[in-house]
């Protein structure tokens, strides 16, 4: 549970973009983004997409979805700024069904679109939207209709389940049950 690498979002309700994804390149993520883009008329997708290849200081060849190259891995302030400005974050998984991005998006007050999540206690009440890649128009309509409620519910979930205070309380609860 949580976030990493000096992530520090400053959510804003006034300066928001529709959203998107920025993160390490995988073919899986690239395919998901291509399917979403196909749901819109050419040039009409409201989301921003960005990839880099490699991880941390081990960056290999950097690029984003427009084919432009850049010569660094994603720095925490850039990532935090992007997440802070997004209304909706696509939290595509990487090496496992889980990703820090989901928790980081919740911390930034974003609407979360994700594939089906594992059946674990901390996702029980997460107000995420399962992505339907073949019919993304239906997902987009749902986001548009429930945008305000989804942002509020995500913030409540973050505070109640995934914030440092909530996780600390869970650890104390577990320790007490274990007799520690």
Image (cartoon, rainbow, N blue to C red):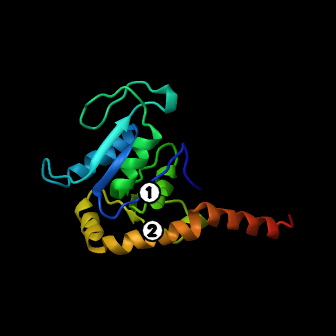
**Residue 1 found in image quarter:** bottom right
* Residue 78, numbered label: none
Q: For this rendering, which residue is in front, 30 or 111?
A: 111
Element at label 1:
helix
State the count of labels. 2
Disc 2, SS = helix
Residue 143 spot, x, y in % from top left = 30, 67
Q: Which residue is mark 1?
A: 105
Q: Is residue 72 left or right of residue 141?
A: right
Instruction: Sort mark 1 into few (<14), some (14-19) or many (20+) by Cα contacts within 10 Å.
Output: many
- Give coordinates of residue 86: x percent, y percent: 34, 56
Residue 51 lies, with reference to residue 45, above or below; the image says above
**Percent position of residue 127, x then y:** 44, 69
Residue 130: x %, y % from top left: 39, 63
Q: Residues within 10 Å of mark 2 (few under 14, many from 20)?
A: many
* Disc marking residue 154: 2
Q: CA distance from mark 1 to mark 2?
A: 9 Å
Residue at (25, 66) in percent of width and height: 138
Mark 1 or 2, nearer chain start: 1
Whether the residues at callouts 1 and 2 have beta carbons within 8 Å, the answer is yes
């Amino acid at each position: 549970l949580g976030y990493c690498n000096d992530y520090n979002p400053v959510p804003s309700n006034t300066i928001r973009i529709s959203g998107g994804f920025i993160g390490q390149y995988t073919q899986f993520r690239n395919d998901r983004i291509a399917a979403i883009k196909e749901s819109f008329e050419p040039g009409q997708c409201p989301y921003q997409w960005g990839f880099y290849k490699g991880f941390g200081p081990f960056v290999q060849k950097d690029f984003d979805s427009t084919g432009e190259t850049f010569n660094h891995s994603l720095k925490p302030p850039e990532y935090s700024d992007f997440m802070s400005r997004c209304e909706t974050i696509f939290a595509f998984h990487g090496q496992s069904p889980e990703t820090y991005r989901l928790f980081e998006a919740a911390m930034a007050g974003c609407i979360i679109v994700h594939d089906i999540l594992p059946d674990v206690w901390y996702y029980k009440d997460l107000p995420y939207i399962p992505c339907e890649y073949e019919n993304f128009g239906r997902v987009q309509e749902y986001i548009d209709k429930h945008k305000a409620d989804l942002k509020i519910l995500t913030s409540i979930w973050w505070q109640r389940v995934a914030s440092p205070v909530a996780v600390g309380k869970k650890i104390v609860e577990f320790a007490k049950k274990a007799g520690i």
